[in-house]
Image: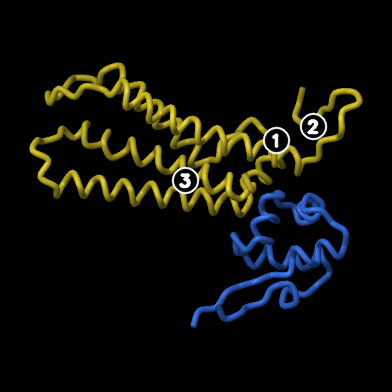
Amino acid sequence: MSPLEQEPGARPVSLIDLADQYSRKRALLAAIVALVFLAVQLVGRPVFTGQRAASPGVSLQYWAINVVALLLVLATGGGLFNGARVRALVNDDVALQHRRSALGAGFWLAMSVAMALYILPLGRTFTAREAVYLIVTPSVFFALLTFSFLELRAHGV
Amino acid sequence: MSERLINHLKRERANRGLTQADLASMVGVSRKTINTVENEIFIPSAILALRLAAALKMTVESLFEIVDS
């Protein structure tokens, strides 16, 4: 059933209602996905051997795929299979500002972690891959969570 | 002294018997946008402010106001 088709007898759903429902779901899902992403990293953190491997391990590949997918959601707002009109409503001025704020929050966290890794005497050295992992993981998590928080607040949740 | 943008959107919308969804539909934005503008969480762009004023048949200056905070 397409988003605009209705079951017989059901109350008609306007585009505004549909966009509202989708936007709420997206905000909730962003928080859940961010928390799951972080939990998976905390539980099954990849092991960095300090050696330059020919290819990254399986968990690092999963991590990279996850990060790319989450960044795509952050960049596009997701919902690529929704109709153009619903997508325009879901990604209207407020959502775009929330996305900008979320990306800004992620950027500043990334800079903070990167500077901390560079300046603080942490007692060990990091491989480039490990440093990228330590910078990107919390930044993507924080950006998604910020987006979710701003969207849910706008919805009055 | 800093300045703050306030608006009379909620009052004017209610005076016309419109819901947030009605106004959102007239302007072509989401209900969330109307809600955040009314609660002064979101400062609308000039384009959106003009569209809101046009939908309510008002001028932008009568719908939005700068006050000293």
CA distance separating discs 2 and 3? 30 Å
Q: What residue is rendered at 66% in x and 40% in y?
A: A87
Q: Secondary structure at mark 1?
A: loop
Q: Nearer the viewer, residue A83 or B21?
A: B21
Give chain B's shade: blue
Q: Which chain is yellow?
A: A
B24, above or below A77, in the image: below
CA distance separating discs 1 and 2? 10 Å
x then y, percent, for residue A137: 33, 35
Residue A139 has which mark? Answer: none
Name the quadrant of the C terminus of chain B: bottom right
Q: The disc numbered 2 marks a residue on which chain?
A: A
Q: Secondary structure at mark 2?
A: loop
**Residue under pointer 3:** A146
**Residue under pointer 2:** A4
Disc 1 marks a residue whose amino acid type is Gly
Q: What residue is rendered at 75% in x and 63% in y?
A: B10
Q: Nearer the viewer, residue A142 or A73?
A: A142
Disc 2 marks a residue whose amino acid type is Leu
Q: Which of marks 3 and 2 precedes in the sequence? A: 2
Residue A83 has which mark? Answer: 1
Q: What residue is rendered at 57% in x and 39% in y?
A: A27
Q: What residue is rendered at 58% in x and 49% in y?
A: A153
Label 1: how many Cα within 10 Å (few below 14, some 14–19, many 20+) = few
Q: Nearer the viewer, mark 2 or mark 3?
A: 3
Residue lying furthest top: A58
Q: Are marks 1 and 2 in contact (CB under 8 Å)?
A: yes
Q: Which of marks 1 and 3 precedes in the sequence? A: 1
x then y, percent, for residue A98: 53, 51
Q: Are marks 2 and 3 on the same chain?
A: yes
